[in-house]
Amino acid sequence: MSAAPEAPVTYVEAQLRRRRRLLLPLLILLVLLLAVGLIAVGFALAAAERLTRNRTEAFPDIVAHFEHGSIGADQSSGIPFWVWKALPRLFPAEFDGHLDYRAFGFLYRTDNHGRQEDLPIGISKRDFHGVDLVWFNCAICHTGTFRTSEGAGRVIVRGMPSNNLNLYGFIRFILDAGVDERLKPDKLIPAVQAAGANLGLIEQQVWRHVVIPTMREGFIERRSRLGTFLAEQAPWGLGRVDTFNPYKLVQMEMLLDAISPDERHAASDFPSIFNQRPREGMHLHWDGNNSSLAERNLSAALGAGVTPETVDHAAIERVAAWLGDLQPPRSPHRVDAAAVERGRALYMNACAACHGYQGPDRYVFEGAKLGTVEPNSTLGTDSGRLDSYTEAFRQRQLAELFAGTPFQFKHFVKTNGYANMPLDALWLRGPYLHNGSVPTLRDLLAPLAERPTAFVRGIDIIDGKNGGFVSPSCTPGNRPAQGFCYDTRLPGNGNGGHTFGTTLPDNEKNDLIAYLLTF
Amino acid sequence: MNQDVIFTPLRFRNLTVKNRIFRSNISGRFDNEDGSLTQTRINWECKFAAGGVGAIISSYVPVLMEGRIIADYATIHRDDFIPLWERLGAAVHRFDCKYILQLSHSGRQMDFPGVHNSHRPALSSTSRKETLHGFLCRAASKAEIDHLVQAFAAGAWRAREAGLDGVELHAANGYLFTQFLSSGINDRTDEYGGSLQNRARFLIEVIRAIRARVGREFHLQVKLSAVDRNNVIPWEKKGNVLSDTIEIAKWCESEGADAIHVSTGSLFPHPLNPPGDFSFETIATTYDAMIASGVDAFRNFLLFRYRLLRPIFRWVWFRMKKGLPIEGVSMEEARAIKANVTVPVLNTGGYQTASFIRNGITSGAFDGVAIARSLVANNDLVQQWAMGRDLPERPCTYCNKCLLNAAKNPVGCYELVRFPSRDAMIEELMTIYATRPTLNLPPVVAAKAA
């Protein structure tokens, strides 16, 4: 009945018991160490798996690949997906109170059930080192919308310029957010959780001490390179980008002082990217500085945020192959057939040599001067964009980018004007000229004095009478209810030049416009 | 036949044995827990006497209860056991066979401590546990050594009083004397440890004490391990070498030993003693009886019991046997010792072939042989030789199942292939119980008045 342990019967058993008693703590320690070791190995393996992870979704469908497939920019320039989701909660004013990125002109597709997709068009996602990163792909700058009237439904068109995108505003926002206290872990982690991240305790610590500091350092570094420059620039407005200046500051790590004042006003329209194959060999880019589609594509990808180390050539080439023969939607404008015929005659006589022409089924890329560079001495359009691409920058491009690889740049040239562009999908490409300084085709045929000095960009209702988009006049400094007030008097925004056809009589202008509306 | 050297008498100083064949020490667990011998032991010894051996060296006989290796082996620690031993001696003498009592003390090599010893560590030269089974021990003090010396002298005196023909000191095979003699085991720093002379001091003191007690005329022989080969557990010290043992044998002779009995190995059993096979299937069913005896015994049981683990022990046990014969495994060592002493030398180790033994004697390797297993297999081995056979009809296979069964089962031959049937084998095993003792009734003691 006694609870006292029974004494051992033999000396051997007594010694064994003593030995067991002495060994028990060691055994427990050993078991604990083993358990801790196993757990540590487990964690190490899991961590190693995560830290070596670099995977992104492969989209069998080319359209989905264009809209969300990664080209490698997410790895080098991306921000964590959950931060992307949390930012609208932390900065409601900048997002107009939405929990998505429509405030910056990002476009969202809706699924079959009418639900808006998680990520906007032009954003890819990649699990890199265990953290989902998101950033741009090609579609961010090359997907736009139109409406046929105020009340009509919005149509998303892949390949047209991103006429809604406020890239300048978005980049400024990201740069400012990097130094905003709302991105401190104490505020960001709850917002990330509220956005649905569901981070565990360990992951929260990883975010607090690694992910967020790393991200903020990246933001601050980008801000130190770009912030001052962008703040001094006039806002680009919707549908426009300064292609090469951020490139100089970020990719080339050039100092701001190395960029002369003449180079700094270069914002231009996003181009359309239909029908790429017929363009091979033409002078590409607004200033025609490269005649290789592949190089132009890679250069554009650098602008989207890839680096020579992270670029996914296969993903880009897949997009390029698809774009080769991508046809724009036919112009919906209803025009008088007789007028079109008269306009065609005028066009074929005066314009087709430089721009090609619209055939009955598709655009015809023929013309003696199509795709060649027209010296700006004769063209006379704003030189900001031309001047931003310099010989010095070209030298560094050729020497440094993809050096030692088959992708090393060879075809960049410094030109003295702007390239004669094919005019396919002209109805989706307003405002016109490289810098989008002339709102409609009718305005383009008007003498400089009659072209609008300030007008609204970013309204996606097509203008069936004048060509381009509805672009009411506005007063710079006053924010319009919709879109962006474009001021042609700002440096780089000049609306002069390309005076061809401005002296035609009105009836001929009408006929010419009727034909151009079919493009 | 008279010319056959095997059958010529072997004359010791105080004893003459009719031939050159000695039954070596072997026993079963057939005596009483108090150490008194039984009818079964008499039956056992008489089997060999009847079979024609010249002398029987008793099994290991402890001089003290704390020196038992196995609890139910007969002892000679009490004067009132003298008549029992006298009875045994008389039984054997009827066959013209001599009986030499092996005086022993287990030291730490105590396989079954029994109720007398299980509560305490065994006395030894050292306090380090035995390495194979993990038997525990404690280094004897000087007073305890003196007590041990006197116990051996008293044991010899009792043997003489019982009319037995001599005594053998079991100073081989890892028992107490080996524990003092072996440089691999003895770690003492007093006069009983260190140099060979110091390590031999205990044995020499025992011989002197016996001579002092029983005089010069009583036969006294010493069984020595020629080489310790103490490294059965690979990282142990190797222990004494042949030259050490030759020196010890010479000292024994000069102190009054009448013969040297040469064996090998610093523990028992040892890979080379007895040489031969090792039946894992047998020991897996018997070693459980020893699990409580040593702190490492359970480990061994697992090594014996599980096939996956057996290669470990197989390597430990068999690596030493490579290149060595079974029969006459230590014959050359006996020859070396014989060359250095003048007293007769006996040798043990797998002897079974008459011509081999004859050659050993005539070539001067030894004067006689002590045999256990081959005689257990064929009790009449000597008679078969006498009839002209060189090897018995059904020889011992050296399977060692007799040894590995000893922990649990009756002693005898368990090599089934040697018998026509299992029943025949059991019948042979049971023969030692055939002659039954007279059963006496205990006296009735009247209750004391209140």
Image (cartoon, coloured by chain):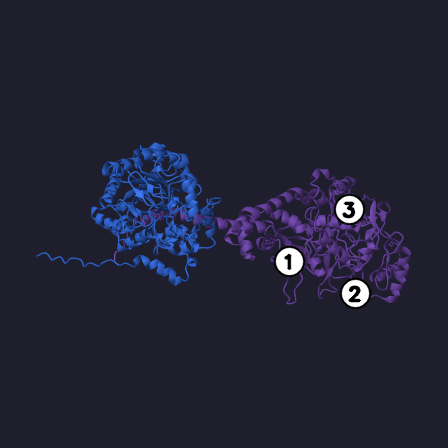
Chain colours: A purple, B blue
Q: Tell me the element at label 2.
A: loop
Label 2 CA crowd tier, 10 Å (few <14, some 14–19, many 20+): few
Residue found at the far front of this picture: B2
Which residue is labeled 1 in the image?
Answer: A119
Amino acid bearing label 2: Pro
Q: Position of residue A289 (x, y in %)?
A: 80, 46
Which residue is labeled 2 in the image?
Answer: A332
Closer mark to the observer between disc 1 and disc 3? 1
Query: Mark 1 or mark 3, which has the lower sequence index?
Result: 1
Labels 1 and 2 in the same subunit = yes
Tell which of B108 and A491 is nearer to you: B108
Q: Quadrant of residue A471?
A: bottom right
Tell me if residue B237 can be seen.
no
Label 1 CA crowd tier, 10 Å (few <14, some 14–19, many 20+): many
Chain ID at mark 3: A
Query: Mark 1 or mark 2, which has the lower sequence index?
Result: 1
Q: Position of residue B441 (x, y in %)?
A: 18, 59
Q: Which mark is residue A385?
A: 3
